[in-house]
Image (cartoon, helix red, strand yellow):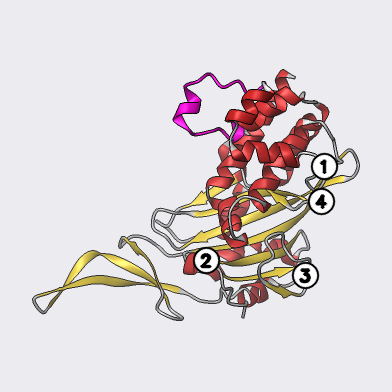
Amino acid sequence: IGEKLMAHMVETMAYAGELPWHGLGTKVEDNISVDDMLKEAGLDWKVKKIPATAEFEGQKIYSGHDMLVRESDGQPLDMVKENWVPVQNADAFEFFREFVEAGDMEMHTAGSLQDGKRVWCLAKVKDDFTINGDDRVDSFLLLTNPHMYGRAVDIRFTPIRVVCNNTLTLSLANKGDYQIALNHKKAFDAQEAKELLGIAKGKMETYKDMATFLSSKRYTDAQLRTYFSTVFANQNPKVKGIGFNPESVEDFEKYGSKNAKTAMNIIKTQPGAQFAEGSYWQAFNAVTFMTDHVLGRENDTRLASSWYGVNKNKKTKALETALEFAQAA
């Protein structure tokens, strides 16, 4: 069973290949099967609903809701409604089986966050591209099975830049093209998810086009300061009201946010800085490097935030902003 990690967010985890960027998990053999990854990642448990009751004057009163619990240890996960259908981890992982057995994908990492509330699996798709011949980006699919009310089974296209292991989970163009959300009102249908994601490989070309475009557009130092100040805006109300001009070196040093200044400092030292140097591809990757490897106190919280929290949204904003700046360059 996957190693129990002494961390705030990651409960159990397993990985194939090289140690992931966050440095967490138990190593398993390459080309591991879907069933073995489920077991080695410590995810071979089931959830069930039990009536949620309260005691009043010696009588048990049904609340009208059920509690979702983990069968293996009774861990409470969330309160759900009667018509809410839990998705078992094994059923969610069925999405990958045909792809893995056909050799089109490889199981990469899998694990549990927040005491079992969020289970994920990242699988590598046999698809990649390079920028300027050396800067490789691999394609992954990230499946999340949340044992939380109001959260759907979610499958996202996830490109990862190899040189620095910077991650991205996003919807490019139309939301449905990259993200499939299946609710808990009916049983999870892995075949349905496969049909909805049939265009995923073709959409990798869209991201390649974006990356190529960003690598072809150069920034000036003034534009770079403005870019980082847009992505990492100073939230101090006093700064917002003084007419801060990030193009000015003096203004940037005085009023720029701490994270914007950090981004400026690492622009030429980040892993892969030699690729498309001076371009908006380099600027964008400075943001993804910071969110995945610099911001936050612990690797496990960076992992959760990069895929599901504030940093996920920050990276999406960074890409959209980089494209806007590059188009104007």
113 shown above or below 180 = below
- Marks 1 and 4 sit apart, C-alpha to C-alpha, by 10 Å
Q: Disc 3 marks which residue?
A: 31
Q: Position of residue 138 (x, y in %)?
A: 77, 50
- Marks 1 and 3 sit apart, C-alpha to C-alpha, by 32 Å
Residue most toward the right? Answer: 133
Q: Quadrant of the N terminus?
A: bottom right
Residue 163 bears which disc, if any? 4
Q: What's the residue type where badge 4 is placed?
A: Val
Callout 2 environment at 10 Å: few (<14), some (14 to 19), or many (20+)?
A: few
- Marks 1 and 2 sit apart, C-alpha to C-alpha, by 32 Å
Q: Disc 2 marks which residue?
A: 8
Give the mark nearer the N terminus: 1 vs 3. Answer: 3
Give the mark nearer the N terminus: 2 vs 4. Answer: 2
Q: What's the residue type where badge 1 is placed?
A: Ala
Magenta span of residues: 230-247
Q: Nearer the viewer, mark 2 or mark 4?
A: 2
- Marks 2 and 4 sit apart, C-alpha to C-alpha, by 28 Å
Q: Position of residue 109 (x, y in %)?
A: 67, 65
- Marks 4 and 3 sit apart, C-alpha to C-alpha, by 22 Å
Q: Main secondary structure of the magenta part?
A: loop
Give the mark nearer the N terminus: 1 vs 2. Answer: 2
